[in-house]
Image (tube, helix red, strand yellow):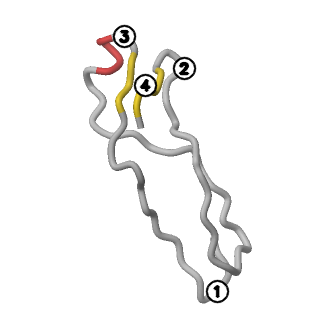
Amino acid sequence: KPTSGFFTYAVTKPSSVMLKGPENILGPIEKIFTKPVDVNGLSESFKKEIALDLPECLDIISL
């Protein structure tokens, strides 16, 4: 949780990615999440590139 008076929000760029992998894994995917980000105690704005939380069998081929 960020320091009192601060809040979290997300800006997602790019808004889509192209993935490569087995059809049975790709087929049901409708959205992808990022890996968790620790915001405990933050008291100033920050920007950070965050890894996508993908199954190991998938590869990103285009951002």
Q: Residue furthest bottom?
A: 5
Q: Residue at x 31, y 12 (%)?
A: 24
Residue topped by disc 3: 22
Mark 2 residue crowding within 10 angstroms, few (<14) / some (14–19) / many (20+): few
Helix, strand or loop for disc 1? loop
Q: Earlier in the sequence, mark 4 or mark 1?
A: 1
Q: Amino acid at mark 2?
A: Glu
Numbered mark located on residue 4 in the image: 1
**Marks 4, 3: nearer the viewer:** 4
> How far apart are the alpha carbons under marks 1 and 3?
44 Å
Q: Earlier in the sequence, mark 1 or mark 2?
A: 1
Mark 4 residue crowding within 10 angstroms, few (<14) / some (14–19) / many (20+): few
Helix, strand or loop for disc 3? loop
Which quadrant would the N terminus be assigned to in this image? bottom right
Mark 1 residue crowding within 10 angstroms, few (<14) / some (14–19) / many (20+): few
Q: Position of residue 15 (x, y in %)?
A: 34, 49
> How far apart are the alpha carbons under marks 4 and 3?
14 Å
Q: Nearer the viewer, residue 63 or 5?
A: 63
Q: Amino acid at mark 4?
A: Ile
> How far apart are the alpha carbons under marks 2 and 3?
11 Å
Q: Earlier in the sequence, mark 2 or mark 4?
A: 2
Which quadrant would the C terminus be assigned to in this image? top left
